[in-house]
Amino acid sequence: MVNQVWDVVIAGGGPAGLAAAIAARRKGLEVAVFEGVSSDTGIDKCCGEGLMPDALVALRELGIVLPPSAGTPIAGIRFLDGDTVAEARFPQRYGTGVRRTTLHALLVERAREAGVSLHWGRPVRGLAPGGVRVGDEVVRCGWIVAADGLQSALRRAAGLESVGKYARRFGSRRHFQIEPWSDLVEVYWAHGAQANVTPVGDDEVCVAIVCGDPLLRYQDLLPLFPALVARLDGAVATSHARGAMTASRRFARVTGANLALIGDASGSVDAATGLGLSLAFQQAVVLGDALLEGNLSFYQSAHRRIAKMPRLMEMMMLAMDRSDGFRRRAIRALEAEPAQFSRLLAIHAGALPPASFALRLPLALGWKFLKA
């Protein structure tokens, strides 16, 4: 390692880092990934475990196709708030529910097949002249990609950290052995909390709960959703509850000199959107092109464009969280206009361009909202 000079060094071996590594390697660049976790056997993390259709499109652009055995097709989304139920289905494409460990193991396999040099149990400690510091060693490289998460140390070291407050909530998830009762992701709403149910296998669902109170444990939150508790009656938990912070953060810049941020390190949307992994995979595709061209300004502008619509969706979801009255009226409006809800979902999942949101959709839903 002392004499090796890599084209690209990536700090972080999670899905974002591995996707960036695969993208760069497919462009012919020599890539090394350094990760602090010592095992490559599927790093687990609190996650809703649903991949939207645009996430699967981005993965295919990276040469990755999930085998049918890896997950379960997802046809759309359903909102449930008391007796009000609104649902929409993806046009043409499907999403996939997949265990985080399964997804990570698949990405590791694909990265290894592509010729990425993987270094487990060796975290990047900081920046160094000509490269990065890994333990007591300086690893030399041309480009650095920081995929080291929400609290990115390399982001701070590069001077890209923004000062100020940001929206934070807390998520937890657990798996249950039960045959999925729907091919939709279900979102159950309660005051200050949402529970997302994603089918991840023929006999397993992931139940992820997001709320604003970090002191509430999973077993305290689940009873807030009696209809969901009834669905899970008799189901055996197949995993321990796992929690993490979810945040809405954005940064003025995601590039600096020879360094680029990706995934949560580059900013994040609230977990309620279900788009964290989708954003990371789309970012990886354009980052590979930018690294090949040696032009990170291209990545900077594309990164902003990729996040634009998810930010709008995040605003709507968080507004529904903050106000029970607004949420009930919004879900009743969506229930009354299923075609418009499907259109909104198609934009959310990348199946329709954001321009489709311009006029007809807000007018139709706005009228129903006023009458709800």
Image (cartoon, rainbow, N blue to C red):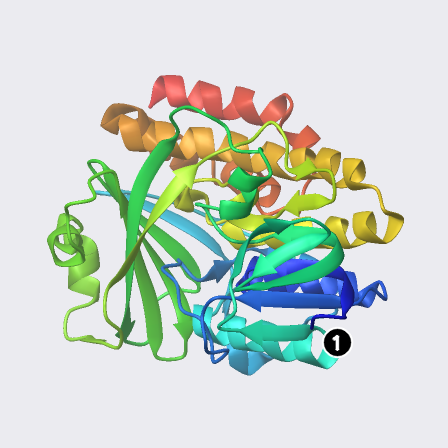
Coordinates of residue 82 in the picture (x, y in percent): 21, 42
**Image check: 180 left or right of 254?**
left
Question: Which residue is labeled 1 in the image?
Answer: 114
Q: Quadrant of the N terminus?
A: bottom right
Quadrant occupied by the C terminus? top left
Q: Residue furthest front?
A: 136
Q: Is residue 267 in view from this perspective?
A: no
Seen at 76% across and 64% down, the residue is: 6
Question: Whole-percent x and y of residue 210?
Answer: 29, 47
Relative to 315, residue 246 above or below: below
Name which residue lies at 68% across and 42% down: 352
* Residue 26 sits above or below residue 265 on the image: below
Q: Which class describes the residues within 10 Å of circle 1: few (<14), some (14-19), or many (20+)?
A: some
Let me know if residue 233 appears in the view: yes
Q: Position of residue 225 (x, y in %)?
A: 18, 51
Left or right? Give the position of 223 relative to 313: left
Q: Nearer the viewer, residue 227 or 213?
A: 213
Q: Measuring 35% from the left and 79% from the top, which residue is drawn there?
A: 203
Question: The residue tagged with tag 1: helix, strand or loop?
Answer: helix
Q: Amino acid at mark 1?
A: Ala
Q: Choose between 134 and 341: the one closer to the eye.
A: 134
Q: Position of residue 299 (x, y in %)?
A: 74, 41
